[in-house]
Image (tube, helix red, strand yellow):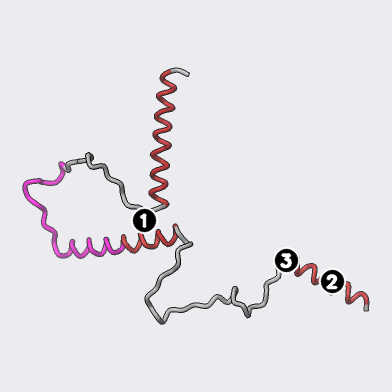
Amino acid sequence: ISEDELDQMDEIFKDIRALQIAASDYLHPERPLLVDAYVCARNYFSRPSEPEYETFGAAEERARIVAEARALKHQAEIFAHPEKPIETTDATMFGRNYFARSSASEQENVDECEERARILAECAGLK
């Protein structure tokens, strides 16, 4: 294997690792972000000499967007982890599972229904 091929393989493995990290972040939005203390950046598009002032309407819009993002994050956590119990604070909320209750009749599958029909037909033929 040549040195160019080794360099290409190294780049491919770096890309694979970056994709694994991105997929893990997507599947687990509840995990905190990891930040390196030495990472820094500067935004050259904003004026450093004068801070921008936010209007009342923009502040309301930002608060609405943040609240919506929190709700979406919560829904993503519920979707990604269905094993977690559902928490509610409303005392009037209740539900009933009519399919798994103890008084429900047991459901038969297709094979059992066909076998029962065959047995009943044989019994009718014996009369």
Name the kind of residue labelled 3 in the image: Val
Task: Find the magenta span and give its range.
Answer: 44-68
Q: Quadrant of residue 57?
A: bottom left
Horizontally, is 17 left or right of 97 in the view? left
Name the kind of residue labelled 2 in the image: Ile
Q: Which residue is mark 2?
A: 119
Which residue is located at x 59 percent, y 73 percent? Answer: 100
Which residue is located at x 14 percent, y 46 percent? Answer: 46
Q: Residue furthest right?
A: 127
On the rendered image, what quadrant is the C terminus found in?
A: bottom right
Q: Looking at the picture, how far across and down is residue 123, in whole percent?
A: 88, 75
Which residue is located at x 45 percent, y 59 percent? Answer: 81
Query: Which mark, residue 110?
Result: 3
Q: Looking at the picture, how far across and down is residue 117, in whole percent?
A: 81, 71
Horizontally, is 50 left or right of 89 in the view? left
Element type at mark 3: helix
Q: Which residue is mark 1?
A: 30
